[in-house]
Image (cartoon, rainbow, N blue to C red):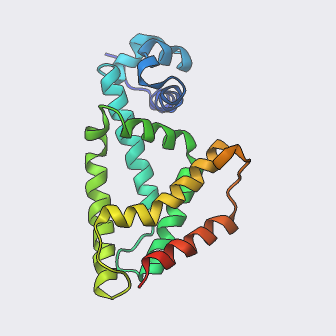
Amino acid sequence: MRIRDVNKVELVKEKAVELLVKVGFEGFTMGKLAKECGISVATLYIYYKDKDDLILQVGMEETERMSAMMLADFDPEAPFAVGLKQQWKNRAKAMLENPLSVQMMEQLRTSTYQEKIFERLIETFKSTLGKFMHNAVQRGEIEAMPLETYWSVAFAPLYNLIRFHNEGRSMGGRPFVLTDEVLWGTFDLVLKALKK
């Protein structure tokens, strides 16, 4: 039995993300991935049972890596404005530095793989952000609200700005580049909307 080559595994993951974004799940095959990696299809089967196993493993690892970046240095005990700003910094950094991962995660979110891949991630975010929200409500910084409402107000504007930036255009096709001024100006509006 051949031994796993760590460098090849990393190459396979990187090329899998690129290929999934480029051709989608329907167009993704082990043969195409092997060709992109410059390896034989048989080599892929050393690392993964089949196409579904590869997509699940790569999807879970990438999702966990991105979520770790988004939760870095975040303290659910922090004052509301401080904690929300840290979340914006983390999420903007993670998403701007990893646009292909973001696109792949969006594809996974609407696929048959989503339940298995996002199950653990949702629990982690729910408990961390739930505690953060609970603390902010207890301190009288924000009103009590469903987590989904909080997320929609707190992060949807950020995600839209990053999507516009990654696409290079905004509404109506106008050119768009995300600047610190736009990012933090939008953050200030979100903070005003959420704080008591």
Q: Viewer-proximal residue, 71 or 108? A: 108
- Quarter placement of the N terminus: top left
Q: Image height check: is 78 above or below 74? A: below
Residue found at the far right of this picture: 175
Between 162 and 17, the one nearer to me in the picture: 162
Image point 39% across, 45% down: which residue? 63
Q: Position of residue 46 (x, y in %)?
A: 35, 19
Q: Where, quadrant-wise, is the C terminus in this rendering?
A: bottom left
Q: State whether residue 170 appears in this view.
A: no
Q: Is residue 40 above or below residue 168?
A: above
Q: Residue at x 43, y 81 (%)?
A: 195
Report x, y in % for residue 194. 43, 76
Residue sticking out furthest to the bottom: 139
Q: Residue at x 29, y 31 (%)?
A: 112
Residue 109 seen in this snapshot: yes
Image: 136 above or below 93: below
Q: Position of residue 171 (x, y in %)?
A: 64, 49
In which quadrant of the rendered view does residue 76 lie? bottom left
